[in-house]
Image (cartoon, rainbow, N blue to C red):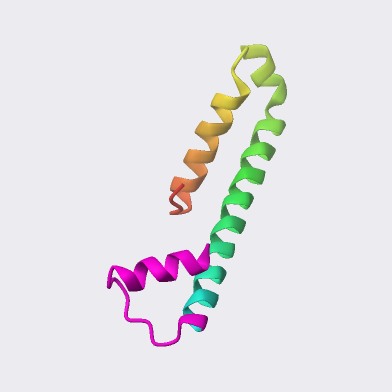
Amino acid sequence: MAEAVVKRLVGRKLADVRDEARAREVVRRILAENFQAEEKIDADARTLLMDNAKLIRDSASDYKRLFALVKTKLAKERGFTL
């Protein structure tokens, strides 16, 4: 994936890359950090929902819908774009 990103950036002249291997490594690191941040948001959303499981069950709310709402709210609060 990192290789494809670097090729597109260079091909579209959106970035001046002198060392493609280094650029690929930077893109890999950024992607990994991004995936980890999203996984943390997912885990925090699940925790919030589990902490309120009885309330959710009693209100007959849809878990998937609530998960999406909580995840979106957490991401927005943290400045993270999903």
Q: Is residue 4 magenta?
A: yes
Q: Position of residue 25 (x, y in %)?
A: 55, 76
Q: Position of residue 18 (x, y in %)?
A: 39, 87
Q: Residue placed at 61% from the left, 39% from the top?
A: 45
- In this rendering, the answer to whether 16 lies above or below 38 is below
Q: Is residue 52 magenta?
A: no
- Relative horizontal placement of residue 73, taking residue 38 as reference (left or right): left
- Relative horizontal placement of residue 12, taking residue 39 as reference (left or right): left
Q: Residue placed at 67% from the left, 45% from the top?
A: 43
Q: Nearer the viewer, residue 36 or 76?
A: 36
The image quadrant of residue 14 is: bottom left
Q: Nearer the viewer, residue 74 or 28?
A: 28
Q: Position of residue 16 (x, y in %)?
A: 32, 81
Q: Position of residue 52 (x, y in %)?
A: 68, 28
Q: Residue furthest bottom?
A: 18
The image quadrant of residue 61 is: top right
Which portion, as a residue range, is magenta?
A: 1-21
- In this rendering, the answer to whether 17 lies above or below 60 is below
